[in-house]
Image (cartoon, rainbow, N blue to C red):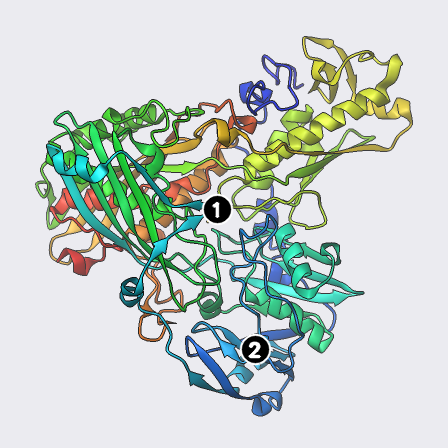
Amino acid sequence: MLQGLMGKAVAMAPDSWIPGGEPDPLIRVRHGHVGKPVSRIDGPLKVAGAAPFAAEFPMEGMVYAALVYSTIAKGRILAINVAQAEAAPGVRAVMTYRNAPRIARPPVFMSDQKAAGGDDLPVMQEDFVRWNGEPVAVVLADTQEQADHATTLVAVSYELETPMTDFASAKDAGTRTAVFMGQALHQEIGDAEKALAAAAFRVDSHYSTPRHSHNAIELHAVTAAWIGGVLRLHDASQLVAHTAWSLGQMFGIPEDKVVVTSPFVGGGFGGKCLWQHQVLASMAAKLVGRPVRMVLSREGVYRIVGGRALTEQRVALAADAEGKLKAVVHTGTTAKTASNMMAEPFIVATRSMYESETFKLDVQVVELDMLANTFMRAPGEAVGTFALECAMDELAEALDIDPVELRIRNEPEMDPTSGLPFSSRNVVEAWRTGAERFGWSRRSAVPGTVRDGEWLVGMGCATGTYPYYRMPGGAARITLNAEGRASIDIAAHEMGMGTATAQTQVAAERLGLPMGAVSFHYGDSTLPGVVLAGGSQQTASIGASVIAAHRALVKELLAMAGNDSPLAGLKPDEVASRDGGLCRIDDPARHETYVSILSRAGKGSISAEGEAPMPLETQHWSMHSHAAMFCEARVNSVTGEVRIARFLGSFDCGRILNPKTAASQLRGGIIMGLGLALMEETQFDERNGRIVNASLSEYHVPVHMDVPDIDLIWTDIADPHTPMGARGIGEIGITGTAAAVANAVYNATGKRIRDLPITLDKLL
Ligand code: MOS
């Protein structure tokens, strides 16, 4: 039934997608499971209400938790009066720093391969407060309502210290060069400022982007219990194995004494990592000797889950009369805390986007007394491409060159700042097909000239880009049973993006089985692997691990098949999976089914585990996805209101494994980009570090009425240096989008808004 599914199969070297190896044979498959628009296999469970989320696991004797948050940014707790709260109906206990179990600090994310903490501050261990909103008490009660009510009865007084919460003052006090993933965010090639001063054409502008807060539909939640010395967490997580290890470190127990499951997650976007709620719930469960459920309120998410930091960026571009770039300057400042390692890396995209003779790239950072900032969808690229791609639009106008054409003229042959060849780069194709489909040629180059009644209409475009990553530590296990069914076990994550579906397709293809014969198990820290759902790299990481496990399985199956099999004498490299069994790659007739191999051996099942090789591919190639984004905006000349009329994303993301789930990811990214462009802004009171719009009702995100038809196309050109030929698709949609919107607004109105979000007051 799956004959021909492997296409022109090639021998799979042990390191097939890494330097010197053959491409993964699955990238040649054209008519099998890979590439089919399969609906999400978890969909029916969700619509039937049968998918248990973190806050829905019932536990015997469970109590409900609610948090009391500090109202100062820095200082000592003088007194906490919990007597009234403790006496309130249903209240079982109130936990503060005085009675909380003693634990170690969280391992901060990026300090260790398995570290998951948003920061490394002590969790309810001291009488000291370090950000405005830090939890100072946990109320535990028989119902959520009783717990919520009792939090209002806790009285806290503080001795205030002067916090550093003002960005301008912090900058005046001194900045330092930011570091991201161990690399200083600074690079200079040639003398860019000199080239800028000497150039025939130049633009030089400042752009700013505000703080953003995470607003996943599913609130951050955890159900925690200590059962026989094992800490058991039902979490909403994008890193279960990291969370288990990190909690083990904090509680001083081995990581296998912490079990974290997260089968369904209602959105992550970088926010569903380890924050105080999982730790506090685990501590509270220990304190009261009962399971604890902690669901953050909408306000709670703003108080204890970090978001995107603000940025101030300068982009200066210089070009000759033909539009060839002579200088790219992209510098600026962002903020973090002293307790985390995440400086918003807004220059990362600029490193590989355009050819230029000179570069000056630099991110400075200041440390503020605030909730630790963190990853939010395309950290760096989302806001960095806003500045860079607005500047490209400004340069195009200065040169009187079409903005699409200007970008194509500056297409690099190899990575302009690393000198590496690109693994696969087809952004020019994405530009041309996108421009054609969008009807870009109908754009008026003169701003403010197209009118539809009181609406001004304009078109804008921008490049989106996001790097390919793959992280080490990925083991996976494949088990085949006597009925010829396979299960794939890996501690990976399904946050609603279609991972379980796409990976079932890929595994079925790799094993030569129908999809119905494959089950993909994930979201459990006891499964093999340390996979992070982040950096748009989970698909490649799982793929690499499953390739390794498949190779181990083939080896063991051949050994089990023995001399009586049609496969006798074949080496693993000569064998492929096809039609429910193994066959010789160039002679499919030499075939034996898994069922036959197992039954002749008298075995009920066979299991093999493999570990993905180190991700060396990014040391040999510059690996990035790209997109050409096109926007049509309508701006009301009376009210300044912006409506997005049309949007097209034309993508080059390698092989698309499942067009249906991929489209949903790309579209979702673009929608989040529309929010970045027009709405999202965390209002941070610089006097006291308080977030004042800590509620989804006062923090605007796009709703259905704000989202136009979003058209999506892609090149579907496989990247030979990635597993399955695929690069990530989770984050790229948000990149370039804000610039495409801003450029369309400029084209409509002649008003250049360089400060996000583009609200109507800025257009009047
Ligand atoms: Mo993403 S910000 O790496 O979850």
In which quadrant will I find the N terminus? top right
In x, y percent, where is residue 366?
36, 60
Residue under label 2:
126
Q: Could you classify mark 2 by the number of other residues whose Cα lies within 10 Å: few (under 14), some (14-19), or many (20 or more)? A: some
Is residue 707 visible to us here? no
Residue at 84%, 19% (x, y): give it.
Answer: 561
- Closer to the camera, 80 or 288? 80
Q: Where 443 falls versus 169 (above or below)?
A: above
Q: Callout 1, which amino acid?
A: Gly
* Dot 1 crowding, Cα within 10 Å, few <14, some 14–19, many 20+: few
Indicate if the residue with disc 2 has its beta carbon within 8 Å of ligand 1: no
Q: What residue type is labelled 2?
A: Glu
Does residue 55 appear in the picture of this structure? yes
Q: Is residue 409 left or right of residue 695?
A: left
Return the x and y of residue 86 as percentages of the image width and height.
62, 88
Residue at position x 72%, y 73% from top?
290
Residue positioned 72% across, 49% down in the render:
526
Ligand 1 within 8 Å of the CB at mark 1: no
Q: Classify the position of the C terminus by image quarter.
A: bottom left
Q: Does dot 1 land on a helix, a strand or a loop?
A: loop
The reply, left or right, for residue 170 in relation to residue 402 is right
Q: Quadrant of residue 39?
A: top right
* Mark number displayed over residue 423: none
Say whether disc 1 or disc 2 marks the residue closer to the N-terminus: 2
Q: Where is residue 176 in the image (x, y as percent from the top left)?
A: 36, 55
Q: Is residue 180 or residue 27 the one in the foreground?
A: 180
For label 1, the residue is 182
Q: Is residue 591 left or right of residue 707?
A: right
Using the image, determine if residue 287 lies above or below residue 727: below
